[in-house]
Image (tube, grey):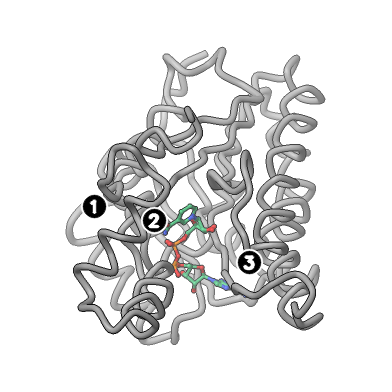
Amino acid sequence: MQREQQQPVLITGSTSGIGLAIANSMARAGHPVMLHGLASVEQGEDLQRQFRAEYRVDCGFSNADIASEAGCAQLVADTREALGNPGILVNNAGVQHTADAHGFAAEHWHNILAINLSAAFFLSRELLPGMRAANWGRIVNISSVHGLVASQQKAAYCAAKHGLIGLTKVVALENADRGITANAICPGWVETPLIQPQIESIAREQSIDIEAARAQLIGAKQPLAQATKPEAIGELVLYLCGEFASTITGASLPVDGGWTAQ
Ligand SMILES: NC(=O)c1ccc[n+]([C@@H]2O[C@H](COP(=O)([O-])OP(=O)(O)OC[C@H]3O[C@@H](n4cnc5c(N)ncnc54)[C@H](O)[C@@H]3O)[C@@H](O)[C@H]2O)c1
């Protein structure tokens, strides 16, 4: 079914990195966008001004902290106030912390699970009834190659990202008869602030420069040793929300330079 008007989209963690690129792709295509992330109200207003000027779409902003169920409810309330009920949800916000499992602090474990996995569940649960009533909806979960394979020192991240793929499949099955699709995107290395600390730590530990550390980090896992541009993920989300993707559901799509083909 083709929509007459572009549906509003809520993109979590869209003040930075991949989420911001997704917001740009969706707004360029005419979707009203709900921007969200841990930024100040002033930064949020600046971002909204840029989006309105560049794309002439409605937009809103929320800096609700989605590490709790109450924060997720706040984000949904802010979104409905700004744009009405969103027909598209992109669960993108995520955090990372690396340590061996035998020394992984509980605080980091809970935080990663809350933001990278539980928030996607709470937001889907809130928004699915509206999508089901409309007989149309799109949920795109930004998982990771670490939803498909493991790396050392990423116990919480791998657990959350594998869990997100499981959640995606259940939501896809439960809503297949209502014009709603749910898919996961599984990026390898993407050029964003999230991977910067990992590059800096390699540079520090091996006393090499940042570029050499970047090449080492990416080449260690990806046969095609090139980081993906955030814009590439934005365009894939747009495709998954479009007419030609109406039968793609429950899928986990790697964008990983061959990482998981090995
Ligand atoms: N960068 C990569 O190489 C890569 C690879 C695979 C998957 N991913 C996934 O892509 C997603 C986006 O990553 P990114 O690299 O763009 O990260 P980023 O650090 O650039 O952006 C993260 C966004 O999430 C928001 N956020 C974090 N904690 C929050 C909280 N408690 N409440 C509300 N918002 C919060 C931040 O404000 C920001 O907008 C994440 O889920 C990440 O796991 C990234």
Vertical relation: 157 (above or below) 27: below
Residue 217 lies in what quarter of the image? Answer: bottom left
Q: How many other residues sit within 10 Å of disc 1, few (<14), some (14-19) or many (≥20)?
A: some
Q: Residues within 10 Å of mark 3 (few under 14, many from 20)?
A: some
* Front residue of 24 and 32: 24
- For the point 73% across and 30% down, the residue is 169
Q: How far separated are the C-alphas under marks 1 and 3?
A: 44 Å
Q: Earlier in the sequence, mark 1 or mark 3?
A: 1
> Is disc 2 in contact with disc 1, using a CB cutoff of under 8 Å?
no
Q: CA distance from mark 3 to mark 2?
A: 23 Å
* Tag 2 secondary structure: helix
What amino acid is labelled 2 in the image?
Ile
In the rendered image, the vertical position of residue 4 relative to residue 256, given as above or below: above
Q: Residue at x 58, y 33 (%)?
A: 138
Q: Position of residue 250 (x, y in %)?
A: 66, 25
What's the amino acid at mark 1? Arg
Observer-side mark, 3 or 2, equals: 3
Disc number placed over residue 56 in the picture, else none: 1
Q: Nearer the viewer, residue 106 or 3?
A: 106
Q: Is residue 192 above or below residue 249?
A: below
Image point (50%, 54%), residue name: 11
Instruction: Report helix, strand or loop for mark 3.
Output: loop
Q: Which residue is mark 3?
A: 153
